[in-house]
Amino acid sequence: MRENKDARGLSIVIIMDGNGRWAKKRLLPRVAGHKKGVEAVRTLVRAAIKRDIRYLTLFAFSSENWRRPAEEVSLLKGLFINALEREIDVLHKNNIRLKVIGDIASFGPRIERLVAASERLTEKNTLLTLTIAANYGGRWDIMNAARAFFRAHPNALDDKTPTPEVLEPYLATAFAPEPDLFIRTGGEKRISNFLLWQLAYTELYFTDTLWPDFDGKTFDDAIASYQQRERRFGRTSEQVQTAQTVSPPHHEIADFSS
Ligand code: IPE
Ligand code: IPE
Ligand code: MG
């Protein structure tokens, strides 16, 4: 078995893609792929805990997925409700904190209430933060953060231009560190409006494995690839090798205070 002790403490984000193609290959309806996809999420959460991952963020429904046939959208909503209702106690018992990011008001009051209750129940849990991105879009997130920032700092443009980092407390992911590793299954090599801002210095990993087939082995392949990368954050390789710790560049920039 491959050693993955260095996966400890990582923040990993995943675009779970390929459910439809998984089903099509088996001559099954797309819904069968989505159901199998939920099982793959369960497997993944267990694998993440075993590997001491601290933050796991999963793209479940993008702001563009409303463009799908109404039947599929409603089915995905149903699966989300089911999974939340069925799994929340298990998550809580396992000391997992659940967060949901995205414009969930559009899903209606039932999901909104369920999400709020689930987040409240698990808010003090510390083993793993599991974040589900639902009706999430990276551009929405940035726009939302900008609005909130300028509402809180109406004079922010008066005498100096705010640094980009001032937006971070207003992003939907403000509670989490920047992602270390991004994984996309299903073979496409694109971001599809996921965490646009947050991925600035994240290591990207793409695999042809379809999401329902994703398991501990594929997860370890992604982590092993991450472990071979040198994260330079703009510096030279020589600088990185002599430095004690290397952090993203903006940590060296003073905070905006007004
Ligand atoms: C990902 O699988 C799940 C969601 C986007 C909700 P897809 O449904 O996109 O599967 P493919 O890409 O059609 O195979
Ligand atoms: C991205 O997958 C969104 C999710 C996995 C939730 P899509 O299947 O929607 O992405 P595109 O349309 O192929 O870019
Ligand atoms: Mg897809």
Image (cartoon, rainbow, N blue to C red):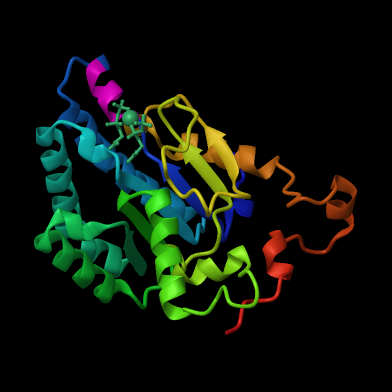
- The residue closer to the viewer here, 164 or 78, is 164
Q: Tell me: residue 70, above or below residue 51.
A: above
Which residue is pictured at 60% across the width and 83% down the height? 257
Which residue is pictured at 82% across the width and 64% down the height? 244
Quadrant of the rendered structure where residue 142 is? bottom left
Indicate which quadrant contains ligand 1.
top left
Quadrant of the rendered structure where residue 115 is? bottom left
Asked whether residue 128 is in view, the answer is: no
Position of residue 57 in the picture relative to residue 61 (left or right): right
Position of residue 90 in the picture relative to residue 185 (left or right): left
Asked whether residue 211 is in view, the answer is: yes
Which residue is pictured at 53% across the width and 40% down the height? 220
- The residue closer to the viewer here, 236 or 88, is 236
- The residue closer to the viewer here, 30 or 258, is 258
Which residue is pictured at 63% across the width and 42% down the height? 226
Magenta residues, dominant SS class: helix
Q: Tell me: residue 214, above or below residue 197.
A: above
Position of residue 165 in the picture relative to residue 55 (left or right): right
Q: How many marks?
A: 0
Task: Tell me where residue 122 appears, x and y as whole percent.
Answer: 30, 72
Which span is picked out in magenta? 18-24
* Quarter containing the N terminus: top right
* Quarter containing the C terminus: bottom right
Residue 78 among those drawn in magenta: no
Residue 22 among those drawn in magenta: yes
In the picture as drawn, the residue positioned furthest to the front comes out as: 158
Task: Tell me where residue 61 appears, x and y as whole percent.
Answer: 28, 44
Task: Tell me where residue 72 appears, x and y as whole percent.
Answer: 14, 34
- The residue closer to the viewer here, 23 or 203, is 203
Task: Tell me where residue 217 appears, x and y as whole percent.
Answer: 48, 35
